[in-house]
Image (tube, coloured by chain):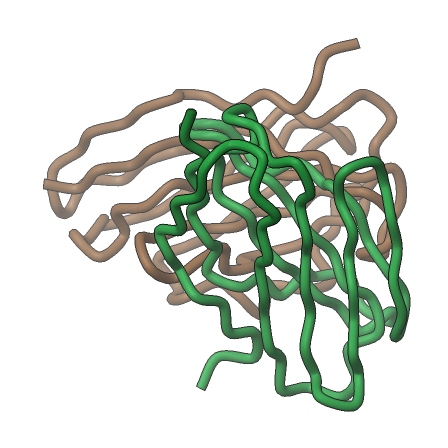
Chain colours: A brown, B green
Amino acid sequence: GAGVSQSPSNKVTEKGKDVELRCDPISGHTALYWYRQSLGQGLEFLIYFQGNSAPDKSGLPSDRFSAERTGGSVSTLTIQRTQQEDSAVYLCASSLSPGGIETQYFGPGTRLLVL
Amino acid sequence: QKEVEQDPGPLSVPEGAIVSLNCTYSNSAFQYFMWYRQYSRKGPELLMYTYSSGNKEDGRFTAQVDKSSKYISLFIRDSQPSDSATYLCATFTGGGNKLTFGTGTQLKVEL
């Protein structure tokens, strides 16, 4: 069926507000990844889910960032008290099973702008 | 210093040219090397990957890895305007799950 979908596609928010970004992975994919893409920084790994658990949260930049995954499917990335430096494209990817060699399929991303 | 370094470009070439895109990496534990293509306002898509050193060819694309010099290359033959995109190299150790990306090189193939 469909590929990885993300919503919203664009989000403009004011500094200090909380935002929620959603990722709907490919059906049947057990592994889900969040990355952040900033200008000049490339893609930075944020967090990885295997099923509903997150064995690797090493890329989350601060405790303002959190993520959860329910039902082994949809994931939500939450940024609390947004700062201007949080402005970036947030990309979600899923793969059939964990392990980078398994192709990660990316969604189109959510473009976040914090004013 | 970033673990994977990549010249951001932009790189502009005429249609039909051979394009060479390159990355260097610092972590000798990296074993898998990938190239992703990203069109404007889209997510990256995997072009090809190689394991350890050597070459891999897929149509007009050839990926090359030299582990002794920690150098990764992607060659595009007979480049087309549709190849205009950002190309990202990525690596991972083989035992983990997260990819480490370069910053991406923006390529424009002009008519």
The percent coordinates of residue B15 (x first, y second) are 51, 32
Q: Nearer the viewer, residue A1 or A40?
A: A40
Residue projecting furthest to the top: A1
Quadrant of the rendering where the C terminus of chain A is positioned: top left
Query: In the image, is A68 to the left or to the right of A87?
Result: right
Q: Quadrant of residue A55?
A: bottom right
Tell me what residue is drawn at x 54 percent, y 37 percent.
B38
Query: In the image, is B10 to the left or to the right of B43?
Result: left
The percent coordinates of residue A38 (x first, y second) are 35, 53
Q: Nearer the viewer, residue B88 or B10?
A: B10
Tell me what residue is drawn at x 84 percent, y 74 percent.
B31
Tell me if residue A25 comes above or below residue B12 in the rendering: above
Query: In the image, is B99 to the left or to the right of A76?
Result: right
The percent coordinates of residue A57 (x first, y second) are 60, 63
Quadrant of the rendering where the N terminus of chain A is positioned: top right
Q: Nearer the viewer, residue A67 or B7?
A: B7
Q: Nearer the viewer, residue B33 or A19?
A: B33
Tell me if residue B66 comes above or below residue B89 in the rendering: below
Tell me what residue is drawn at x 60 percent, y 35 percent.
B79
Tell me what residue is drawn at x 48 percent, y 55 percent.
B104
